[in-house]
Every structure is written in C-alpha cells, then in structure tokens.
Image (cartoon, rainbow, N blue to C red):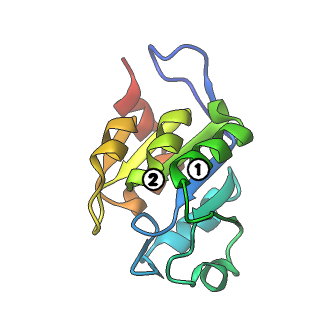
Amino acid sequence: MIEMKIPGQGDPWQLQHLALDLNGTLALDGMLLPGVGDRIRQLSSLLDVYILTADTFGTAARQFAEYPCKLHLLDPHDQIMQKETFVRDLGASRCVAIGNGMNDQGMLQAARLGICITGPEGAARAAVEAADIVIPSITDALDLLLHTKRLVATLRK
C-alpha cells in the first residue's frame, strides 16, 4: 500500500491497486516499452498490479508471464465501461489508473488517481480531460508512484 498526505486533499490517500492499460500505455505495437517491467516488479511490492487489455496484438499473456501482476482480458466491445467497472469493483478510492486512450477515460475518472500518458501514441482528449495528472511517459508515471513526494508536489492545493 502507498499512503500519502496531500495538503488540501483531505484525509491521507491509501492506494492499494494499480490498473494499467496495455497498448499505448505500457506497450507500443504490442511490445513492452523499456523500463516498464522493472518498475512493475518494484511497484508490485506496494500495490496489486492489474493489466487491462483486449490483447489486440495477442502478446499480453506471454509478455507478462514473468511479472508479478494480474492480466484482465476485456471484451472488444464497450471497453470504457468495462475498465471503469473493473476499477470500481477494486475500490476506486484506493486505486490508481494509468492509460492514454479513449477507452481509458472511465477508469481514469473513477480512480482516486488517474494518470494519462501522452507517450508515443499520443493521448485521446477524453483521457487527458478525465485524468488528474498528464505526463509524457509510462516510466515517468510509474516513477511518481515510487517517489510519492513528486505526486504530493503536483497535487497539493
């Protein structure tokens, strides 16, 4: 669990879950981006890590077999609602969600902390508007969770 007090944000945040979009966020063209695997390993000691994907490229199970995370496969239809429901079922107030696509907007908005990645694929406007933080890369986003004073500096009122 990650616990942090953010000035002006009420009670301390207790984050327990991390919901991650795969394609466009963790991976480009179905291949995991450099540095992501190491950070998932580090974060798995603090948070329950979930990868949400329709597995467009058919590579998810193979790529994540060696990592301490859970793969959640989505139906290709209505992914916005599926991802949002997944985050709500985990307990949205204890969840961080990271994504970049149109289908990530629901989970980014529902989660206690929604982070939008603008990475190599760019980001959908709906995802940017739904997020609490917008950041250029997935490694930078995951580093925010490993170095929470950065989050405090960005989110304090």
Task: Estimate the spatial distance between the alpha carbons at disc 1 and disc 2, rounded to whole Å.
Answer: 8 Å
Query: What residue sits 61% from the left and 50% below the top?
Result: 82
Q: Position of residue 25 (x, y in %)?
A: 42, 63
Q: Which residue is depicted at the point 55% across and 23% down? A: 5
Q: Quadrant of the N terminus?
A: top right
Hey, which quadrant is residue 54 in on the image?
Answer: bottom right
Q: Quadrant of the C terminus?
A: top left
Q: Are marks 1 and 2 in contact (CB under 8 Å)?
A: yes
Residue located beneath label 1 in the image? 83
**Number of numbered tags placed on the structure image:** 2
What is the quadrant of residue 90 in the picture?
Answer: top right
Give the residue type at disc 1. Answer: Lys
Considering only vertical position in the picture, is 127 above or below 140?
above
Viewer-side residue, 41 vs 52: 52
Q: Which residue is mark 2?
A: 103
Q: Which of the two discs, 1 and 2, labels the residue nearer the N terminus? A: 1
Residue sticking out furthest to the front: 77
Q: Position of residue 93 (x, y in %)?
A: 64, 30
Residue at position x 58%, y 43% in the image: 84
Q: Secondary structure at mark 1?
A: helix
